[in-house]
Image (cartoon, rainbow, N blue to C red):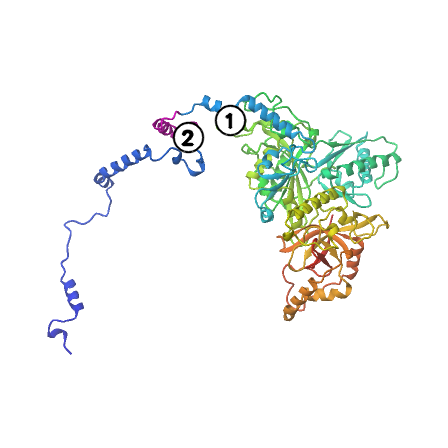
């Protein structure tokens, strides 16, 4: 082998290393500075910078980019007109130059008014008069929030008719939103949802006597004679809490809420309010008349009375319908005049007999939403202001259904600085509530300032509330919603605001990220909670029967409108009431028609050939599938119950065989004559991940299920699976229009 010292190497790498080893090292004459001289750098590039500025200025004034193209995309319009006034001031000169270059004259303000006759004073008066006339139509009265809902919801009635069609419960209500809302409604309960319930009917009952005790006891007896299950007890007479109860007459007539108005020191008059659904107004009137006649007989009751003392009892229905001017947004009395330009100009005041606006809020962050809307005023009672803020900070601070009253400022203005005050522990002081009073029902509230005046104040930087002109009294009622097993506990609130402030507070709640829901969304929400909703689930009530007949006609029309090849094939046995209606409940499994009635509890009543006692139940699908409306319920035979339970809850080793057995059982049809109930509302519940339904079942069938009930055996190992459906009470649910598949469902009693 040749050594490296013997001569030059022929390896290419050696020559490269030798060349780099003898490379010349260049040393700069002076070291490079570590600092950057800005002036020197700019002076060296001065000509380039000036050329760039000239190019930018020429491009800004060039005609290759139009004035409308310089606007952001969300401010552009598809059809840009020659109206230069629609552009911002910074672009109007460029737009005028473009119009001159194209031999087009820019339109002036007078020319715009001549081309838009609808912007004249005469057209303004005509539009306001038209809105007032539409808001005053009988059977379709507007709420104060109608204009807001009409832009975002499908309203009740038919649009094809000249008068808009028939309303719902005497009002034009929001039915369903224009966007998809099935999943959104339940998911938004993690935040907050709001529903305008200002269509609620309110009855005012007053008792006058020389002594407060006589007036209170006589009013208690009056409520008991009227049929209220609760609310007449002494624990409710202070007015510190709202009582949720039902109206009874050997059967459940309708749900009702009783609110006692706190007594005023020095006065001997006592009064209470009854909040009911407008579909039950006639029932409440009959009950009040019956109670008035019963008091004339002076029969003994649950409350001792001093019959020798005269007590005057009066009752009337509060007009909850807003005036057409307020509903249409025309607050000033003369529609031929423009809205007042003064900052604090107000219209006429309205008495509390004109009703209030009622908003129902539900969701885990309802208190957070209300904190952004309700700002206590400086003139508020310190104890009420402190309790309002404390209750919104911690919803569990107060007992359920506690009533709070407080003076708050206009939600469109900034919140004032109110010094904190320690809340008081007790709710009442000598039968007088501390945190609520009768001011909300006795004082007169001025109509709010117009939006234009608020905007002018904001332009001047005046965003603070000024005294009583920007202050109103509100009432807040805390709600504690106890759903059926499955969904967690939920808190809510009922907000009452004076007449004229409804649209303002709905806008404020919507801006605070609360989801506004309509009638269909409210029905889906109650189904997820496992609670019945009046009148959609109260079988036997005239309002429900009317809704059932309307639904039957709608479903029948949709079925007949389909081509014969695409229709659902109906079996001959169920053709009589496949679309539901009143016949479904009067002839369900019976040879003779009977009238269904809902019982508040599963207790036996005297038999009658014309009455069919029923109870409201909650159905939960044991496996897959959801229940549609008018699906019938059937009690399985006693000898088949072990097979159903074994197929629904098999051990791990028999899952494949049990699946086949379950398919065989579901494919076996059941006779319509064995029906013991039907579904009123059914869908898939996102709260638990199962199909759910609210229905009515015969009392005898429920008692039979109670006799068959067998306590579940404890698990031999491990734990119960998550969202387990109990199998103690099983019924079979048959679809409304077909024979199969027959699904198994677990039944539980619904609390009214």
| Element type at mark 1 | helix
Tell how many labels.
Answer: 2
User: To which residue does mark 2 refer?
Assistant: 88
Secondary structure, magenta segment, majority class: helix
Q: Is residue 95 magenta?
A: yes
Quarter of image, res 416: top right
Of circles 1 and 2, which is in front?
2
**Image position of 380 (left or right of 281):** left
Quarter of image, res 493: top right
Q: What span is in magenta?
A: 82-105
Q: Residue pushed farthest bottom?
A: 1
Quadrant including the N terminus: bottom left
473 or 136: which is nearer to us?
136
User: To which residue does mark 1 refer?
Assistant: 456
Q: CA distance from mark 1 to mark 2?
A: 20 Å
Q: Is residue 111 above or below residue 551?
A: above
Q: Is residue 555 above or below residue 714?
A: above
**Image position of 184 (left or right of 239):** left
Residue 153, position as x, y percentages in the image? 60, 39
Residue 76, position as x, y percentages in the image? 43, 36
Q: Residues within 10 Å of mark 1 (few under 14, many from 20)?
A: some
561 or 182: which is nearer to us?
561
């Amino acid at each position: 082998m040749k050594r490296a010292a013997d001569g030059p190497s022929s390896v290419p790498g050696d020559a490269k290393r030798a060349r780099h080893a003898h490379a010349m090292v260049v040393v700069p004459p002076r070291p490079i500075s570590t600092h950057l001289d800005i002036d020197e750098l700019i002076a060296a590039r001065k000509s380039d910078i000036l050329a760039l500025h000239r190019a930018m200025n020429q491009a800004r004034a060039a005609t290759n980019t139009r004035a409308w193209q310089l606007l952001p995309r969300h401010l552009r319009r598809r059809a840009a007109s020659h109206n230069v006034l629609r552009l911002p001031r910074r672009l109007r000169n460029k737009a005028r130059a473009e119009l001159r270059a194209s031999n087009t004259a820019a339109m002036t303000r007078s020319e715009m008014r001549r081309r838009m006759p609808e912007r004249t004073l005469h057209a303004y008066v005509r539009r306001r008069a038209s809105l007032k006339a539409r808001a005053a139509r009988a059977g379709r009265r507007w709420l104060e929030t109608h204009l807001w809902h009409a832009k975002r919801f499908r309203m009740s009635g038919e649009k094809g008719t000249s008068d808009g069609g028939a309303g719902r419960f005497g009002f034009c209500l929001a039915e369903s939103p224009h966007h998809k809302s099935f999943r959104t409604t339940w998911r938004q309960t993690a935040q907050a949802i709001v529903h305008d319930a200002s269509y609620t009917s309110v009855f005012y009952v007053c008792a006058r006597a020389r002594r407060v005790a006589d007036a209170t006891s006589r009013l208690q007896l009056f409520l008991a004679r009227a049929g209220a299950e609760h609310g007449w007890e002494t624990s409710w007479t202070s007015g510190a809490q709202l009582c949720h109860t039902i109206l009874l007459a050997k059967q459940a007539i309708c749900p009702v809420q009783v609110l006692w108005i706190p007594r005023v020191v020095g006065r001997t008059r006592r009064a209470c309010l009854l909040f009911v659904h407008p579909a039950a107004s006639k029932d409440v009137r009959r009950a009040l008349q019956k109670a008035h006649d019963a008091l004339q007989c002076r029969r003994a009751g649950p409350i001792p009375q001093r019959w020798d003392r005269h007590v005057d009892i009066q009752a009337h229905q509060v007009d909850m319908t807003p005036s057409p001017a307020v509903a249409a947004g025309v607050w000033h009395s003369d529609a031929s005049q423009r809205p007042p330009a003064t900052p604090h100009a107000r219209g006429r005041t309205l008495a509390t007999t004109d009703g209030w606006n009622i908003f129902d809020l539900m969701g885990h962050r309802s208190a957070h939403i209300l904190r952004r809307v309700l700002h206590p005023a400086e003139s508020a009672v310190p104890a009420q202001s402190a309790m309002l803020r404390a209750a919104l900070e911690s919803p569990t601070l107060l007992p359920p259904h506690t009533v709070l009253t407080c003076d708050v400022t206009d939600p469109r203005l900034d919140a004032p600085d109110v010094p904190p005050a320690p809340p008081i522990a007790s709710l009442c002081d000598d039968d007088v509530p501390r945190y609520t009073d009768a001011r909300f029902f006795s004082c007169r509230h001025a109509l709010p300032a117009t939006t234009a005046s608020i905007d002018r104040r904001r332009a001047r930087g005046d965003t603070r509330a000024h005294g009583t002109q920007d202050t109103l009294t509100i009432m807040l009622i805390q709600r504690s919603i106890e759903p059926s097993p499955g969904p967690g506990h939920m808190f809510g609130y009922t907000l009452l605001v004076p007449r004229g402030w409804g649209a303002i507070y709905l806008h404020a709640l919507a801006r605070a990220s609360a989801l506004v829901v309509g009638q269909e969304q409210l029905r889906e929400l109650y189904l997820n909670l496992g609670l019945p909703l009046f009148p959609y689930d109260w079988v036997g009530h005239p309002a429900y029967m009317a809704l059932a007949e309307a639904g039957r006609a709608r479903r029948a029309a949709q079925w007949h409108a389909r081509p014969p090849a695409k229709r659902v094939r109906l079996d001959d046995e169920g053709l009589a009431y496949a679309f539901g209606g009143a016949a479904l409940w009067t002839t369900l499994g019976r040879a003779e028609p009977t009238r269904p009635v809902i019982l508040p509890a599963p207790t036996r009543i005297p038999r009658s050939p014309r009455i069919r006692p029923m109870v409201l139940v909650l159905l939960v699908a044991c496996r897959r599938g959801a229940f549609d409306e008018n699906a019938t319920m059937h009690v399985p035979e006693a000898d088949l119950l072990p097979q159903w339970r074994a197929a629904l809850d098999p051990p791990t080793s028999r899952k494949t065989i049990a699946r086949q057995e379950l398919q065989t059982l579901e494919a076996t049809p059941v006779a319509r004559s064995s029906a013991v109930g039907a579904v009123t509302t059914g869908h898939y519940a996102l709260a638990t991940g199962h199909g759910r339904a609210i229905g009515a079942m015969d009392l005898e069938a429920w008692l039979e299920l109670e006799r068959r009930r067998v306590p579940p055996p404890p698990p031999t190992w491990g734990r119960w699976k998550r969202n387990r459906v109990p199998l103690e009470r099983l019924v079979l649910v048959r679809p409304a229009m077909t024979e199969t598949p027959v699904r198994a469902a677990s039944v539980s009693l619904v609390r009214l």
